[in-house]
Amino acid sequence: MSVLVTGGAGFIGSHTAVVLLDHGEDIVILDNFSNSSPDMLDGIRRITGKDFKFYEGDMRDKALLDRVFTENKIESVIHFAGLKAVGESVEKPLEYYDNNINGTLCILEAMRKYGCKIMIFSSSATVYGNDNPVPFVEGMKTSATNPYGWTKVFIEHILEGVCESDKEFSAVLLRYFNPIGAHKSGLIGEKPNGIPNNIMPYIMKVAAGEYDHLNVFGDDYDTPDGTGVRDYIHVVDLANGHLSALEYARKNKGAEAVNLGTGKGTSVLELVAAVEKASDRKIPYVITARRPGDIAECYADVSKAKRVLNWQAQYDVDDMCADNARWALKQ
Ligand code: NAD
Ligand code: UD1
């Protein structure tokens, strides 16, 4: 039996593939390389010394999904594939709804057709919207402020509906906080196309000398140093959380939303200082206006992950910055 990893050539998918292979799971990866490259697959093979089946193509290609499900015995799906740039989703809402929602429906239809009843889904802390108090707890109401965020809210509802209609189905909706870091080997990590939207890949380009400074989006938030506070989580911790979720889903039915974070907030200026320490490079920055749509603070209540999945993050921000720099500064 195999675990299908959609989007397995991407940032979080590749690290999860390593954890699954190291744990002795058989995996099959499906990716269209719309935001990744074959190098990541080589990195997974080099780190683990193991091989796996790979299908290049789009998750909305139903004939391809038929091949994947008939040529392999797919027991479960860890579903990372999706578009994830918030600003781009505002400019191209139909592309985001089609890729993320229609893509997920195609995967779910194939799962129904071939009797596969476990899905671990990549949701996001973005589903907590902009008017819940921190720390974010799974029971809070969900909403979104942009099409990307709505795709996550809608897919969570779709999976709840599937579990309601099929009592044998298990879905774990993993709400990631801010994934950064890279595998210790320096062989896999985040490689965004174009100008990075997220802070860590942007800081790395400043560290590498590609950009001369970081724009810090606002220092007038109601936070200890005025800059935005986020719950950064090491991508390897996040990957381990997927194995715990899979083990949970194999024993429990129904839909369960679970936060994957550290529960600790770090400000933009604290992150800059941590990268400077880890990389021994100066990160010049300029304070600019707030970015529209940003909230002051975002961090997780992590008690459910501990209670339900028996998982908790192991790495701190210094580890995340050191591993991230090792990867990014050799690119
Ligand atoms: P990523 O872009 O590195 O990985 C996504 C992968 O999916 C890429 O390899 C891409 O080529 C592939 N893909 C996209 N559309 C596809 C399609 N139609 N068919 C086949 N493959 C397709 O992103 P990531 O950071 O690894 O994120 C993985 C998931 O986690 C995404 O769903 C994302 O929305 C979610 N998430 C990410 C973050 C984050 O900050 N990185 C935070 C919260 C949630
Ligand atoms: C962003 C998305 C969110 C998504 C998440 C993970 C927005 C509004 N939100 O969240 O929906 O789930 O990424 O992909 O885009 N910052 C700077 N300078 C920069 C970049 C960021 O100061 O060049 C600050 C931000 O204001 C924020 C923090 O750094 O305080 C983290 O930003 P980012 O990495 O983009 O993540 P989020 O804002 O949490």
Image: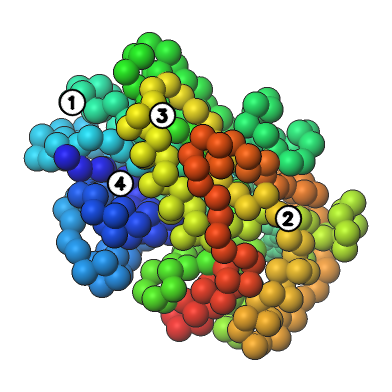
Residue 83: x and y, percent? Answer: 46, 46
Q: Residue 300 vs residue 28: left or right?
A: right
Q: Which residue is mark 4?
A: 5
Q: Which residue is mark 1?
A: 114
Label whose residue precedes the other's in the sequence (4 or 2): 4
What is the spatial separation of the Cα atoms under label 3 and label 1, in whole angstroms? 17 Å
Report whether the residue tagged 4 is closer than 8 Å to ligand 1. no
Q: Residue 42 vs residue 135: left or right?
A: left
Question: Which amino acid lies under the numbered mark 3 shown in the image of this protein?
Answer: Ala
Question: Which amino acid lies under the numbered mark 4 shown in the image of this protein?
Answer: Val
- What's the colour scheme? rainbow
Q: Marks 3 and 1: which is nearer the front?
A: 3
**Residue 265: which disc?**
2
Residue 122: x and y, percent? Answer: 46, 41
Q: Residue 149: name its quadrant.
A: top right
Secondary structure beneath dot 4 equals: strand
Furthest-left residue in view? 71
Quadrant location, the N terminus: top left
Q: Residue 235 vs residue 213: left or right?
A: left
Mark 1 nearby-residue class (10 Å; few <14, some 14–19, many ≥20): some
Q: Marks 4 and 2: which is nearer the front?
A: 2
What is the spatial separation of the Cα atoms under label 1 and label 4, in whole angstroms? 16 Å
Kindly indicate whether the residue at mark 2 contacts the one at mark 4 (C-beta within 8 angstroms): no
Question: Which amino acid lies under the numbered mark 2 shown in the image of this protein?
Answer: Gly
What is the spatial separation of the Cα atoms under label 2 and label 1, in whole angstroms? 43 Å
Quadrant location, the C terminus: bottom left
What is the spatial separation of the Cα atoms under label 4 and label 3, in whole angstroms? 15 Å
What is the spatial separation of the Cα atoms under label 2 and label 3, in whole angstroms? 28 Å
Kindly indicate whether the residue at mark 1 contacts the one at mark 2 (C-beta within 8 angstroms): no
Q: Residue 202: name its quadrant.
A: bottom right
Mark 2 nearby-residue class (10 Å; few <14, some 14–19, many ≥20): some
**Image point (75%, 81%), residue name:** 284
